[in-house]
Amino acid sequence: MEYDFSFQNPTRIHFGKHALEYLEPELNRFGPRVLLVYGGGSVKQTGLYETTLKLLKRSRKKISELSGVPSNPTASKVYEGISLAKKFEPDLILAVGGGSVIDCAKAVAAGALTHQDFWETFFLRKEKPMDAIPIGVILTMAGTGSEMNGGSVITHEESKRKTSMESGLLYPIFSILNPELTYTVPKEQMISGICDIISHILEVYMSPSDEDNLSDDLAEAILGNVIRSARRALKDPKDYTARSNLMWGATLGLNGLLEGSKRQDWMVHQIEHQIGAYTNCPHGLGLSAISANYYRLVCPHAEGRFFRFATNVWNIDLKGKTQTEVARLGIDALEAFFREMGACTSLRELGMDETSPIDEIANSCKRLRGGYLNFTHEQICKLLWDSL
Ligand code: NZQ
Ligand code: ZN
């Protein structure tokens, strides 16, 4: 393999219909104080809040709550959590929800143990935290992979910056993954999660090196399964097999497994995060709105890679076609799949139009250097205008 790499993932996963049975033994490993973090109310509607509270009480935990974490979690919610955690001094932060709840919990876990401003220090200056409160997770939606990685993505509302921090200290100690908990996810959020999984895999897959690399084979296998399982789960939201494949596929898509010896692009995410900072759109739908046009710009610089994607993932028929034509048909197939699911394939579907601050969004995007094409500012502008 061309590029050296280090890999460690410390998160313990409990997966399946009975995974919640592992919560009590996990809780017993920690001291008595638990900060329970959750979102806008879905956990109360589904009954998971009651169940969790019962298990926490049975384990004799003292509980404090940070509720109302919004989708695309905000810095102001993190500040609220930090001041709560500084007073309560939890032994464990238990995040019950999707990526937004987990990411907020992670930022609180790092921010509560420093006197410095969490946003300036960890998210803007990218300094690494020296310490963090341990995190446990009960996952309710498949998509981000935050349940098994050390990343946290937060939106600073005033400055309109959505960006991430990453630390080995922020991997959840344990994550409980029961696919049945995802049955109640609203369809739009489920589709958004599926687009997110696909995008995480593509950010790594669509990058050098192009040697024979196990990572690329794994990526194609997971992509194939996710596409198949998405179709099944959309037809029958209670298809356990499909839901469990999606949940595990999401986790494997961003837990470091695929990144071995790959450069990694991440520009689709970089640009989407800034679209999200301005529009507050569901993350995965922002990704699906720009992905096909992004890859159309990259394709001429890595035709062999896109040819491989078209044939191995989408089974494009080669007969009578040039390599260029096949490569382009693979990108068309990705876009058609997004449309088939009901995901957005244009920024207009996210509520943007010609009066939106498109150049301002383009200006606010950082340009990364891991993909096949080093995007210029003009190319980001073109991508956004083309995607309108
Ligand atoms: O807030 P509640 O009421 O819980 O409702 C949520 C929310 O409205 C609802 N939901 C979740 N599970 C449910 C459910 N409703 C009914 N039943 C359930 N079982 O779904 C909505 C979306 O939840 P959210 O957590 O916002 O979605 P997701 O998991 O897609 O997380 C998105 C956030 O994660 C970031 C994104 O940028 C975005 O801010 N990401 C985090 C990453 C990471 N930490 O590694 C990587 C990703 O690329 C991404 O950037
Ligand atoms: Zn993502």
Image (cartoon, rainbow, N blue to C red):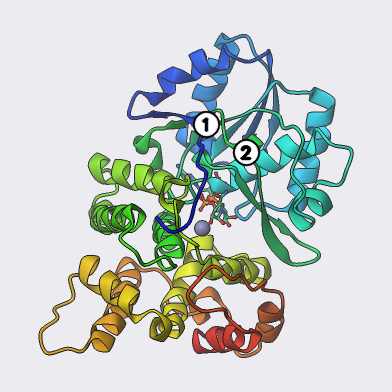
**Image x and y of residue 81, in percent:** 76, 38
Q: Amino acid at mark 1?
A: Pro
Tell whether label 1 touches label 2 (CB within 8 Å): yes
Check residue 107 in the rendering and tell me which mark sits there, or answer none.
Answer: none
Q: Please, which residue is most extreme toward the right here?
A: 115
| Left or right placement of residue 140 versus residue 246 in this view | right
Which of the pair 187/93 is nearer the observer?
A: 93
> Which residue occupies the foreground of this view, 200 or 64?
200
Label 1 element class:
loop
Displayed quadrant of residue 379: bottom right
Q: Residues within 10 Å of mark 2 (few under 14, many from 20)?
A: some
Please give left or right for residue 94 compared with residue 346 in the image.
right
Percent across and percent down for residue 194 are 39, 57
- Left or right: 63 as drawn, with respect to 194: right
- Image height check: is 239 above or below 44? below
- Mark on residue 10? 1
Q: CA distance from mark 2 to mark 1?
A: 9 Å
Position above or below: 62 against 104: above
Q: Quarter holding the N terminus?
A: bottom left
Circle 2 sits on which residue? Answer: 168
- Residue at x 29% of width, y 44% of height: 245
Residue at x 27%, y 59% (from the top left corner): 227
Amino acid found under the numbered disc labelled 2:
Gly
